[in-house]
């Protein structure tokens, strides 16, 4: 009988942060990829693409990270819900200021879902890119992310999608919180 192995250690604070989510990942490899993505996102690499993150964390290729995001048996909504619950516990009933904002990133090509020619506020112009509506909490001068939703332009809607304006997405975020 083989016993499950422990996940590969990364940086102690990343391991500590990710440990509270370990129960949401049925496979140790999925949990390791979860940790590797967190480590990659805080690294000083210029582009936060899967190949760049894989190189930064010492993986031979980005295939395992791609598999984790595309096919691994875990549920993003469960992770988000647990994250919000942990934030609420840490706040200990203290009131926060809720900040709703939109941000965008310019993208080349159209292979990424919901990339379209649209106004990118942080660039101050219309470009090919992707836009999200974001909620942040502010407490004692510290800003922390809460929830985001991708804006889906009418021209890029998929069959299952329903068009929602950015204000509608903001309202949904407020109701979720």
Image (spheres, grey):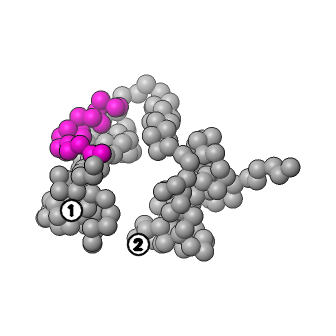
Q: Quadrant of the C terminus?
A: top left
Q: Earlier in the sequence, mark 1 or mark 2?
A: 2
- Tag 2's secondary structure? loop
Q: Residue at x 18, y 40 (%)?
A: 167
Q: Is residue 43 left or right of residue 96?
A: right
Nearer to us in this view, 112 or 37: 112
Q: Residues within 10 Å of mark 2 (few under 14, many from 20)?
A: few
- Image spot of residue 68 (x, y percent): 54, 57
Q: Main secondary structure of the magenta part?
A: helix
Q: Residue at x 57, y 64 (%)?
A: 64
Residue 176 part of the magenta segment: yes
Residue 170 vs 70, above or below: the answer is: above
- Image spot of residue 81 (x, y percent): 46, 36
Nearer to us in this view, 7 or 77: 77
Which disc number belongs to residue 34?
none
Residue 55 part of the magenta segment: no
- Image spot of residue 26 (x, y percent): 64, 45
Q: Which residues are magenta?
A: 160-177
Residue 4 vs 23, above or below: the answer is: below
Q: Residue at x 30, y 36 (%)?
A: 173
In this figure, which residue is indicated by the disc labeled 1?
116
Q: Residue at x 36, y 28 (%)?
A: 95
In this figure, which residue is indicated by the disc labeled 2?
46
- Tag 1's secondary structure? strand
Residue 22 visible here: no
């Amino acid at each position: 009988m083989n016993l499950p192995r422990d996940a590969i250690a990364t940086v102690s604070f990343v391991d500590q942060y990710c440990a509270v989510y370990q129960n949401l990942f049925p496979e140790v490899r999925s949990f390791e990829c979860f940790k590797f993505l967190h480590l990659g996102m805080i690294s000083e690499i210029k582009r936060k693409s899967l190949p760049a993150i894989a190189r930064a964390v010492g993986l031979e290729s980005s295939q395992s990270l791609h598999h984790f995001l595309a096919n691994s048996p875990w549920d993003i909504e469960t992770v988000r819900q647990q994250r919000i619950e942990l934030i609420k516990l840490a706040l200990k009933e203290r009131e926060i200021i809720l900040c709703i904002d939109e941000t965008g990133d310019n993208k080349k090509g159209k292979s990424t879902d919901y990339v379209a020619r649209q106004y990118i506020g942080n660039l101050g112009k219309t470009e090919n890119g992707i836009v999200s509506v974001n909620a942040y909490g502010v407490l004692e001068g510290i800003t922390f992310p809460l929830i985001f939703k991708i804006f889906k332009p009418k021209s890029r809607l998929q069959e299952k999608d329903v068009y929602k304006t950015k204000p509608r997405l903001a309202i949904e975020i407020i109701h979720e919180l």
